[in-house]
Image: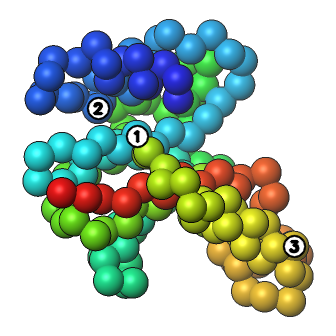
Amino acid sequence: MSHSLSAIQDEPKGSVDLIRVLEKAYVRTKAKGSSTACIVALIEGGLYAVNLGDSGFMLVRNGCAVFKSPSQQHGFNFPNQLDCNNAGDSRSSAMVFKITALPGDVLIVADSRTGTTKSNGSAQRIAELAQLRAMDHTKSLPFSDGAREAGFDYHGEKLDDITVVVSYITE
């Protein structure tokens, strides 16, 4: 993601191309492994985002979700991913979104459904609650529900997939 930030800074002022940003970030990354990707930019009139895999974002207005990005998966627990050896999914398969955002909206960017952060602990608290809920084997959760649908006996959520960034949209 740090390469995404530097790639965004390379973009012409007022004309960000997030697919190009994703491509530049991918090419600059030398780490081994694979990853999902979600990049969101605040532009005039709203949000511009690219998402690949099961990371995603949600826009909340007046306490209600007005948009939630869909997940891209090949099958249960097999999300679309970028891979360091070009064995993963193509960067061009990322979904692109342009969504109207209003002052007062809250943007939540998260890894596995659970931006600049206003430092009141919102992201930290959401992550803590997500982790507590992930360890609750008595609740219906997205990952355990998907596991059962795929024929696996699994309870709880994936604990390694909890990352949250909360941004507050202002004038």
Please tell me which residue lies in front, 156 or 62: 62
Which circle marks residue 39 in the picture?
1
Q: Which residue is mark 3?
A: 135
Give the mark, 2 or 1, whose residue is nearer the N terminus.
2
Check if mark 3's residue and mark 2's residue have beta carbons within 8 Å: no
Secondary structure found at label 3: loop
What is the CA distance from the residue labelled 3 to the residue labelled 1? 28 Å
What is the CA distance from the residue labelled 3 to the residue labelled 2? 35 Å
Please tell me which residue lies in front, 93 or 12: 12
Residue 53 x, y percent position in the rendering: 52, 47
Q: Which amino acid is tagged 2? A: Leu
Give the mark, 3 or 1, whose residue is nearer the N terminus.
1
Q: Quadrant of residue 83?
A: top right
Q: Which amino acid is tagged 1? A: Ile
Which circle marks residue 90 in the picture?
none
Q: Relative to residue 21, is residue 162 depicted above or below?
A: below
Which circle marks residue 18 in the picture?
2
Check if mark 2's residue and mark 1's residue have beta carbons within 8 Å: yes
In this view, which residue lies farthest toward the front? Answer: 120
Determine the residue positioned at 65% across, 30% down: 34
Give the mark, 3 or 2, whose residue is nearer the N terminus.
2
**10 Å neighbourhood of mark 2: few (<14), some, or many (≥20)?**
many
The reply to whether residue 3 is in sight is yes
Please tell me which residue lies in front, 71 or 15: 15
Q: Quadrant of residue 167?
A: bottom left
What is the CA distance from the residue labelled 2 to the residue labelled 1? 7 Å
